[in-house]
Amino acid sequence: MTNGLLLWVDDEIELLKAHIIFLEKKGYEVVTVSNGTDAIDRCRQTTFDLILLDEMMPGLTGLETLQQIKEISPATPVVMVTKSEEENIMDQAIGSKIADYLIKPVNPNQILLTLKKNIHKKQIVTEVTQSSYQQNFGNIAMQIMESRTYNDWTDIYRRLVHWELELSSTSSSMTETLQMQKEEANIGFSKYVKNNYMDWMSPSGDTERPLMSPDIFKKKVFPLLNEGEKVFLIVIDNFRYDQWRVIAQEVGDMFDIDEDMYMSILPTATQYARNAIFSGLMPSRIAEMFPDLWVDEDEEEGKNLNEEPLIRTQIERFRRHDTFSYHKINGTAGGEKIVERLNELLRNDLNVIVVNFIDMLSHARTESKMVRELANTESAYRSITLSWFRHSVMSELLKRLSETGCKVIITTDHGSIRASKAVKIVGDRNTNTNLRYKLGKNLNFNAKDVFVIKDPRKAHLPAPNLSTAYVFATGNSFFAYPNNYNYYVSYYKNTFQHGGISMEEMLVPLITLTSRKR
């Protein structure tokens, strides 16, 4: 078995015998020809792993040969080898999608390096990434055991996402190990939330509260407005930190990025978390102060129809006079209208945009077998997110905003987790349908599997009845009723859900983008 089959095309091939012997000793099989016509004929007969192509040859030039080779074998990497340092030849070669460009005289190690880059890169990256994660495994495990603070947990989550992205880009067998470590981290994180959440909710609590949903405007938006900045707040529903990380690569050349996180309130559901962001209040306070703007779980009305007036109440409560607009994007047409109106929107101090695509994708994945197949893994889910961003109006909007000098804040109301473990729960017919949290009377469950808030008022949550309790799934679990249990579990297993306690749901991105000066 060889390291690769090479085709070397050069009209002075006899002068390269030493190089060829060197490559053969390294395990490569080298086929040689002395002109472009013979090279094209060999490419019709054989598929090569890489082609080394001289640019200056009698008859067909290297560039002419390259064009025909690309038509025959477009996936084969071609390395141009030439004495010429003319810029236009380099441009033409690069424009023809060559894999590399070497200037004669080349030494054997140069050639070996380009072979490793173009033939063995995937294998080398896999081996190095796998080895690096193995070296970090013990350190991360120790960090999980010793984590006590919010900053500890955000640091762990960042590290786990980093390795998840690194390993998912390779064919490493360590992805299962990482998944197990994520599950272990979520067990620890759930304990951390259980032990501290009620203290965070107490006005007199001694425990320092992390930045949470009701704080976003007060701590992040208003300070920028006070500095005279025009602000676009883009809230992408159900947007996870790992999804942000893949999108960050797309905007890094347009903006300087200030990356932060905050903690979503419970339940990590749009009705509660997003209304808390826009009002600057916990849900029970919204229901008390603005009963006409709050919709209870058992009401048929949409739960997020009053976001614009909630923003207005928050601005007025802080006695501010900021002009603002509110928009919700449910499809391409809505996004295009915003781009078209951008000059008009720039007159406002603040523009709030809610983007629903990822939440729609998450629900579609549950309900549609085809979408589930397309996003059958975490990596595929991220890939669809990236593809959406690249081809959506969001990309164009951010490009336009980068030219205006505005501050852009990208965040979300909550994330989601791939739920795979069913937990039995029993409730009456009035119990809500969410798979990651339940509220109702006389709920029966195994207390070890859940986090229970028996007095919702202490957690600033609405309580339709005196005996109402909130029960939250933790880690990667989801609630299932005993009736028709097996069907229910098979239908919802490995779907993306939110509402409960996990790093993916609660530790969410809070990104500030500043236009790069050109």
Image: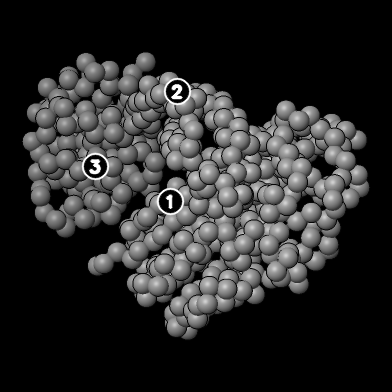
Q: Nearer the viewer, mark 1 or mark 3?
A: 1
Kindly report the distance in space between the C-alpha atoms of the residues bearing marks 2 and 3.
43 Å
Of callouts 1 and 3, the N-terminal one: 3
x, y percent for residue 319 = 52, 77
> For this rendering, which residue is in front, 118 or 281?
281
The circle on residue 314 is none
Q: What element does badge 2 sit on?
A: helix
Kindly report the distance in space between the C-alpha atoms of the residues bearing marks 1 and 3.
38 Å
Identify whether 472 is placed above or below 28: below
Of callouts 2 and 3, the N-terminal one: 3
Q: Where does label 1 land, which residue?
A: 260
Q: Nearer the viewer, mark 2 or mark 3?
A: 2
Residue at 43% in and 51% down: 260
Residue at 9% in and 44% down: 83
Q: What element does badge 3 sit on?
A: strand
x, y percent for residue 295 = 77, 64
Residue at 84% in and 51% down: 466
Q: Within 10 Å of the Cα at label 1, are there few (<14), some (14-19), or many (20+) other Cα atoms?
A: some
Q: Where does label 2 land, which residue?
A: 142
Identify whether 452 is placed above or below 339: above
Of callouts 1 and 2, the N-terminal one: 2
Q: The residue under label 2 is which amino acid type?
A: Met
Q: Where does label 3 land, which residue?
A: 100
x, y percent for residue 322 = 49, 79
> Which color scheme does this rendered protein use?
one colour
